[in-house]
Amino acid sequence: MIVIAFLAILGPVQGAWPDRVVRLHSEAPLIDGHNDLPWEIRKAGLSVSAMQLDRGRTSVLTDIPRLRRGMVGGVFWSVYVPATQTGDTAVRTTREQIERVKQMATVYSKDFEMAYTADDVMRIFKSRKIACLIGMEGGHSINSSLATLRDMYARGARYMTLTHSRNVPWADSATDTARLRGLSSLGVQVVEEMNRLGMIVDLSHVSADTMRHTLRVTKAPVIFSHSNARAIRDHARNVPDDVLRLLKSNGGVVMVTFVRSFVASSAPDVRKLADHIDHIRKVAGIDHVGIGSDFDGGGSLPGLEDVSKFPNLTLELIRRGYSDEDIRKVLGLNVIRVMRQVESVAAKLQGKAAA
Ligand SMILES: [Zn+2]
């Protein structure tokens, strides 16, 4: 009785997950492609240390005790700024959010460490800390400037979603009126410069034509940091089957997301989400699936309510007969592979010997 009451208060502790789940999460880092906690901290108007993320914080879906219970190995923290911010205001806010992520790694250095490469992620994972990566959400963050793009890379951003909810002057969004039917010539230059720098191109939020255009011009694998399969749930934010087939030759990864309206029209849950993984595996292959929760940015499902619940998805994949190797790929090894390929394409384009 006492044990049950204890678990009811704390939720499942690491030891409460089945052995196979614990083993899989210790063999491969679970990398979450998209978490919006940095914007929640900004909205709360609190300093990173006042958030007391190490103590648990129920006003958000992400804190360190729950990341530990969820056996999370790494997170792409989104340095999202609203698409309503334009011009240099968006650039400034993005820089402030990058600083916020770095403060998180400094203030909670017992648990967090900044990661900028695939090797960093694996080293930090082996030291039992959580790797902190930076993802920019929307091309408005660079205000149509390749110099600003380079500056964001130098500050640590390792992916950029080409658009958020609105078009940018050089790329169409999935949720705005189609204007370019893909990328403009500046948009092509942005993708080429991201390839050269070693910044992952993220195609969540962009229109299907922008996805197709980008896949024609990119020299490195792309990700969808938080999107699902359109054949399972017909939503503009999800990936159509023809793009899933293009992704196979590109080498990229769709990181399935927990936003209810992208999972199912009604009654979404962890099983419905796994249907998306099944479908992406069927069309693109097991090498092209990952996880991008969107926790604290709209993601949360029955069974996947907060960062402590990720292993419920692992359990569901086990139930469906996925092999250990397949599950390790979905948890994080696929996106680690993408990072390595992006790094090696950049090294080649910069005339350096590949690492
Ligand atoms: Zn988003």
Image (tube, rainbow, N blue to C red):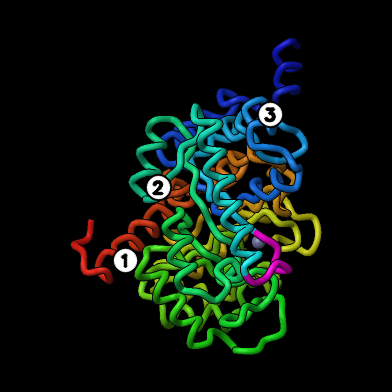
Under mark 1, the amino acid is Ala
Say which element carries label 3: loop
The residue at the point 61 percent across, 25 percent down is: 13
User: How many residues crowd mark 1 within 10 Å: few (<14), some (14–19), many (20+)?
Assistant: many
According to the picture, the residue beneath numbered tag 2 turns out to be: 325
Relative to 185, residue 242 above or below: above
According to the picture, the residue beneath numbered tag 3 turns out to be: 56
According to the picture, the residue beneath numbered tag 1 turns out to be: 346
The residue at the point 40 percent across, 37 percent down is: 124
Distance from Cα at disc 1 to Cα at disc 2: 28 Å
Say which element carries label 1: helix
Dot 3 or dot 2: first in sequence order is 3
User: How many residues crowd mark 3 within 10 Å: few (<14), some (14–19), many (20+)?
Assistant: some
Q: Splitting the image into 4 quarters, where does residue 209 fall?
A: bottom right
Prevailing secondary structure of the magenta residues? loop
- In the rendered view of the protein, which quadrant contains the N terminus? top right
The residue at the point 53 percent across, 56 percent down is: 135
- Mark 2 C-beta closer than 8 Å to ligand 1: no
Distance from Cα at disc 1 to Cα at disc 3: 39 Å
Dot 1 or dot 3: first in sequence order is 3
Q: Can see residue 221?
A: yes
Q: Splitting the image into 4 quarters, where does residue 286 fall?
A: bottom left
Relative to 9, residue 132 above or below: below
- Which contiguous range is marked in magenta? 81-87
Q: Nearer the viewer, residue 168 or 323?
A: 168
User: How many residues crowd mark 2 within 10 Å: few (<14), some (14–19), many (20+)?
Assistant: few
Distance from Cα at disc 3 to Cα at disc 2: 32 Å
